[in-house]
Image: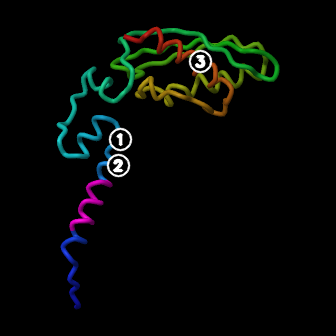
Amino acid sequence: MMSMSVPSSVRKSAAVVGVAGLLVLAGCSGPADAEDAAGTGAESDTGSDSQSSSGAGEYADGTYTADGSYQTPETVEQISVTLTLEDGIVTDVEVSGDPQARETEQYQGQFIDGIAEEVVGVSIDELDVSRVAGSSLTGGGFNAAVEEIKDQAAA
């Protein structure tokens, strides 16, 4: 096996480039992640302070209700969304609607049946539903209601 001798200046330059690359990558992560990547951060606690360190909003625990609307080819439809939050995480969801069109009744029903598995256990700041159980338009009304709930729950 052949060994190569690499000049000291090349090794030092490579080390500097490597450290600079790590710093750039650490800058791309959130504040808590950057500390952990640099090896200087302690493991964060999972209390309510963890939301503010991740850049997420802080929300008061509770149950909140808001209405959202969305356009279908036939009409504008309304849904009502109730979310229960604990530490900014959705622990329960209820959606109800009053469909104006026969087809909307089917799609709202599919959305209502499938929404819990999409949002329960997820941070309210990460909610952005689109197609749920075959229903693609109802998500727009849901997302509008979530934005209103965020405003209500903001601490």
Q: Answer yes or no: do the residues labelled 2 and 1 have beta carbons within 8 Å?
A: yes
First along the sequence among labels 3 and 2:
2
Q: Nearer the viewer, residue 47 or 96?
A: 47
Picture layout, residue 17 above or below residue 97: below
| Alpha carbons under labels 3 and 2: distance apart | 34 Å
Residue drawn at 33 percent across, 19 percent down = 87
Q: Image quarter for residue 142?
A: top right
Residue drawn at 32 percent across, 23 percent down = 52
Which residue in the protein does label 1 denote? Answer: 29
| Highlighted magenta segment, given as a residue range | 12-21
| Alpha carbons under labels 2 and 1: distance apart | 7 Å
Provide residue 130's location: percent of width, then percent of height. 61, 31
Residue drawn at 18 percent across, 73 percent down = 8
Element type where label 1 sits in the image: loop
Residue drawn at 76 percent across, 22 percent down = 72
Element type where label 3 sits in the image: helix
Which residue in the protein does label 3 denote? Answer: 144
| Alpha carbons under labels 1 and 3: distance apart | 28 Å
Left or right of residue 57, residue 127 in this image: right
Q: Which mark is residue 25?
A: 2
